[in-house]
Image (cartoon, helix red, strand yellow):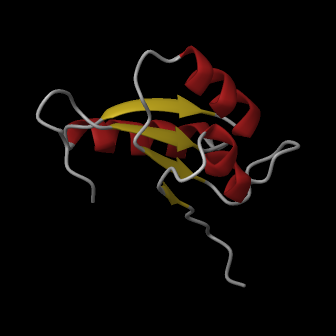
Amino acid sequence: MIAVTDGQSRKVIMVVEDDSLLRESLSLMLQDFGYSVVDAEDADEAISVAVKSVDRVDLVFADVDIPGDIPGRSTATILLPGLPAMYPTSRSS
């Protein structure tokens, strides 16, 4: 896991998940570990949040199967090329 701070401020993780219960649970867990968290329901909202956010996002944690026009795996690339990302899924295939 990335360091909680960079010596100046807490690292920021963006959680992109369409299941509200899972998104809230992940956000709370990450906050309990000391991270700042911004969240979004889908890729379109994630882009909007990232543009408006005063915090720099350090990692994107995005569901592979989020609804909308932008696939989950494209979210981080669209937000900022080279941004570290994790793509969890519950798919078995």
Residue ID at (17%, 38%): 5
Assign the C terminus to one quadrant of the image: bottom right
Residue ID at (79%, 53%): 71
Q: Which of the pair 59/92 is nearer the observer?
A: 59
Where is residue 51 shown, x and y percent of the image? Answer: 61, 21
Residue 63 sits in quarter? bottom right
Figure check: 92 above or below 72: below
Q: Which of the pair 28/15 is nearer the observer?
A: 15
Question: As drawn, which residue projects farthest toward the right?
Answer: 69
Q: Which of the pair 67/14 is nearer the observer?
A: 14
Figure check: 50 above or below 24: above
Image check: 61 left or right of 42? left
Residue ID at (46%, 29%): 38
Assign the N terminus to one quadrant of the image: bottom left
Question: As drawn, which residue projects farthest toward the front?
Answer: 81
Residue ID at (64%, 32%): 46
Figure check: 66 above or below 91: above
Residue 43 sits in quarter? top right
Where is residue 91 shown, x and y percent of the image? Answer: 68, 74
Where is residue 25 shown, x and y percent of the image? Answer: 42, 42
